[in-house]
Amino acid sequence: MNRFPSSGTRSLFPENSAGTSATHADHFRSRRFLLKLLGGSLVSGLSASATASAAGLPLSSNKGKTMKIVVLTGSPHRRGTSALLADEFMAGASARGHAIVRFDAAFEKVGPCLACYYCSEHAGECVQRDAMQKILPEILSADMIVLVTPLYFFSMTAQLKAVIDRMMPQRDALRQHPMKSAMLVTCGSDTSWNMDAIMAQYKALLRYLPWEDQGVVLAKHVFARKDIEGTEYPAAARALGMSL
């Protein structure tokens, strides 16, 4: 678990009590221009498809407030393609003063949900005693959650999915605790439809919990770290973090 303490850096878009001033408008124009430069790497709103333009990213600001952000990664490779995106996102978000807690699910002991419903009879307590005892409280106290994964058979990795499944004991609490969210995904293929299933799953999570999507980075045709290092995707992940 890695923590990035808040640095007190002000928000990218400070609150303007006097209405829409020239300075405020300049912030919005600059942000939209930056996202357009990323050439559609960021996906947000998720209203039509997973290929929506980056210009559609919601331009809501946090009004100068810092957030606690939990980053959950799923890759079994510590220096893989998705790990790079996680690092870049965290660098951008921490530069804006947000506090970050990171869990790399592949290196934590998290058992699969047993569907035993012990939690239903014991006030949300899980029968298993493992890393979820430290992960879940952090999620429940977070303002934002970020899912980071390589694409495995058109979905997130089993390691990350296990963490999602094990949120079930606290599903009622999670549904009463709205959070912001983002997703970073990498894959070796460049097939046009290969991200459809994972984006459908993400949209379902947004609808059920509920989470407020802040953006998605979909990095295709990056099988190994050397393939992604020279692309626009790391900059897109950092820009997403800095946009919060």
Image (tube, grey):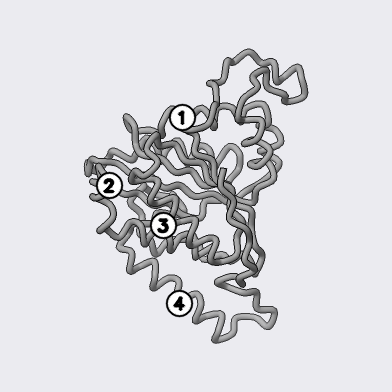
Identified at 54% across, 40% down, the residue is 103
Q: Position of residue 132 (x, y in %)?
A: 62, 30
Q: Earlier in the sequence, mark 3 or mark 4?
A: 4
The three-letter amino acid code for the residue at tag 2 is: Lys
Instruction: Look at discs 2 and 4 and give the one toward the viewer.
Output: 2
Towards the viewer: 145 or 86? 86
Is residue 24 placed above or below 83 in the rendered structure? below
CA distance separating discs 3 and 1? 22 Å
Q: Which mark is residue 242?
A: none
Q: Position of residue 107 (x, y in %)?
A: 48, 33
Q: Which residue is mark 1?
A: 159
Q: Which numbered disc covers residue 237?
A: 3
Left or right: residue 170 versus residue 163 is: right
Distance from the alpha carbon under mark 2 to that under mark 1? 21 Å
Q: Which mark is residue 29?
A: 4
Disc 3 marks a residue whose amino acid type is Ala
| Disc 2 target residue | 220
Indicate the secondary structure of the residue bearing disc 4.
Answer: helix
x, y (%) of residue 157? 41, 32
Give me the C-alpha separation between circle 1 and circle 4. 39 Å
Query: Label 3, label 4: how many angstroms apart (C-alpha)?
Result: 19 Å
Q: Amino acid at mark 4?
A: Arg
Residue 119's place in the image compared with 230, above or below, is above
Task: Please tell me in which quadrant of the rendered image residue 109 appears.
Answer: top right
The residue that appears at 59% across and 15% down in the rendered structure is: 115
Contact (Cβ within 8 Å) of mark 3 with mark 1: no
